[in-house]
Image: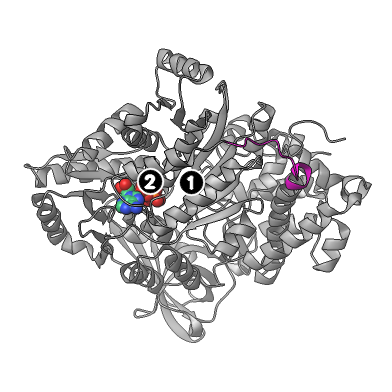
Amino acid sequence: MDLRELAVRQVRGVGPRKAEDLKALGIESAYDLLEYFPYRYEDYHIRDLAGVKDGEKITIEGTVYGVPLVQMYGRKKSRLACKVLVDQVVITAVWFNRHFIKDQLTSGTRIVLTGKWEQARLQITVSEHEFPDRGGASRTGTLQPVYSVAGPITQNWLRKAIRQVLAEYGQWVEEILPEELVARYRFISRREAFSLIHQPKDWEEGRKARRRIVYEELFLFQLKMQAFRALNRGKSDGIAHPVDSQAVKQFVRSLPFVLTDSQKTVVAEILQDLKQPYAMNRLLQGDVGSGKTVVAAVALFAVVKAGAQGALMVPTEILAEQHKRSLEKMFASYGIEVTLLTGSLTEKQRREALASIQMGLTDIVVGTHALIQEDVVFRRLGLVITDEQHRFGVNQRSILRRKGLNPDVLTMTATPIPRTLAITAFGDMDVSTLKELPKGRKPIKTYSVPHDMLERVLRFIRKEAAAGRQAYVICPLIEESDKLDVQNAIDVHAQLTYHFPDLSVGLLHGRMSNQEKEQVMAEFSDNRIQVLVSTTVVEVGVDVPNATLMVVYDAVRFGLSQLHQLRGRVGRGEHQSYCILIADPKNEVSRERLKVMTETNDGFEIARRDLEIRGPGDFFGTKQSGLPEFKVADLMSDYEILEYAREDAAKLVAQSEFWTAARYLPLRDYLQREQVFGGRPFD
Ligand SMILES: Nc1ncnc2c1ncn2[C@@H]1O[C@H](COP(=O)(O)OP(=O)(O)OP(=O)(O)O)[C@@H](O)[C@H]1O
């Protein structure tokens, strides 16, 4: 049975309504459900009070001791407190709004409590409890998977659905790794791994399952790239652009600044690639503000002057507009035509843009992801540059190939990763690095302040605005709730508008139309807006050098790499810039993370410290934006496994047997599904 073909509706307990809800999570088949891995576990093993830290969530067992006490607040709200004897210590168990369980708490009853521990008061705030002597299903002593859920799908419902699909269909999970690899690494079978990752008995089982799944993910990813490489090796069907070095030099001289040494080196590497008959596939990495866009502009200029078209693909419409504007400025005196292609063009504008691209009247197209797919036909596409986020993978490259194009490809990223990791992770790419920031940049000064210092922060905003500078104010982030984020931004905007009657305060959030967003960004760019209140939509790439102040509300809610990206929006010009992180860190990890931000501006150092703080205890790691994303693997911490996976994949594709032997069929099927053979069946 092919579980990929089995609609999730077929799983017992999943009705049509739930099937729709699951679809929103990207789950359509029984297989998708099985592959919806948890991102952490909740530990219900009974703990000894001795080793427990303040604020930890724990499960403990004891006996009810004395009489429970209920306080009511209004009709529904209540606080129930009861003494419980645990390991000969009397503690207080507190329930909120659960007064109806009072009658069950008779003295001497054994009870298991899960909740947050307060050391000073010897008190547990109970979120769940069980009576072990009364039978029934029990969570005690287990690890419960925690899934990323949204909308009407609840954690408990999803747990049940996944248990169900495992019971009903788990046996149909087929092995994909070759026997020799399973044996070499002593992996558990795929079937077992799928079962254990969702319901491990203990951490050891969880680890075993995770190790196997991480390897498999990384191995398949590497296999895909290596196979693609093997199939296309030596193909010189790229475009050898006749680059006019003199013209390029002249263009570079016309820029308002001198290129940094790094920029010069990288430009030379790219021009060299462009001249070759092989299709370039290069990764350009450089920290925030290191000047990647200018490098892209030089490459586009070179290609256009050599008679081809270029495309610049960016993650958001705001960025597309911004890049279009800055390219037009740079190319103003060269007769280079730049066209914008985004989702918010009118039908007529879009038709005109497409015609102009097809006829070759357009030299450079700037747009979002759709621009290389769909109905866009180029006359002579020579170079595709992609910025961040949507990594231009093997798949897209084969789409282009099928269109009969084989352009050079440059991928830009600000994700600070060690060069060796980059080379391994993007197995099929060459890597260029911008090692320095433009001269004259002053390091950004970063401060972390508590919420009650907001008044001072506001005074600081006023001071910068009075000096002619501008500020970003990033609003509190509410996990998994775009709607609440927007509400927050609206509230903060209202407050600041009230507070700064003499300044122009703008608002930017994801629910605004693209036109509105663009309007606001343009006004901020021209300093018609001094204070921009925003959700994280400004995170990547926005470039307004006159902005010198970045204020982030509730900074502990953001990941370190995200904070670094946000901070990178300032310090892009000659003025001293500041980043103020408003936060009341409640635990050591948050304090440590804020400290890292105040201590260093170096993106790579931040990534390294982040990894250190998370430590090996963080079972599933955190996704680093910009790196290829995996369901379970985390490239930074699973780096070693990645190395093995790469080597194994390379060896395998080099064997002629791999392409013929029956036992490798599941792997070849996988490659087929991933379109490595250019959409044609492999023969
Ligand atoms: N060599 C240089 N000297 C001075 N200023 C420069 C130089 N190169 C780029 N800049 C300016 O620095 C700013 C940042 O450059 P750019 O937008 O290219 O950075 P980036 O690497 O794309 O950053 P991010 O990853 O944050 O988007 C821009 O305002 C740009 O005009």
612 is higher (above) or lower (below) than 381: below
The C terminus is located in which quarter?
Answer: top right
- Write down the residue under mark 1: 388
Asked if residue 7 shows in the view, the reply is: yes
264 is higher (above) or lower (below) than 403: below
Region in magenta? 229-241
Cβ(mark 2) to ligand 1 < 8 Å? Answer: yes
Most common SS among magenta residues: loop
130 horizontally vs 162: left or right: left
Q: Distance between the residues labelled 1 and 2?
A: 9 Å
Q: Nearer the viewer, residue 474 or 480?
A: 474
Q: Does the magenta run of residues contain 100? A: no
15 horizontally vs 681: left or right: left
Q: Which color scheme did the rendering employ for the protein?
A: one colour
Asked if residue 41 shows in the view, the reply is: no
218 is higher (above) or lower (below) than 308: below
Neighbourhood count class around disc 1 (C-alpha, 10 Å): few under 14, some 14–19, many 20 upward: many
Q: Which residue is drawn at 52% across and 85% down?
A: 87
Q: Residue at x 22, y 62 (%)?
A: 451
Cβ(mark 1) to ligand 1 < 8 Å? Answer: yes
Disc 1 vs disc 2: Cβ atoms closer than 8 Å? yes
Residue flagged by tag 2: what amino acid is it? Gly
Q: Tell which residue pokes out farthest to the top in this image.
A: 348
Q: Which of 50 and 448 is in front in this view?
A: 448
Percent x, y of residue 177: 81, 55
Q: Residue at x 34, y 66 (%)?
A: 597
Mark 1: secondary structure: loop
Residue flagged by tag 1: what amino acid is it? Glu
- Write down the residue under mark 2: 541
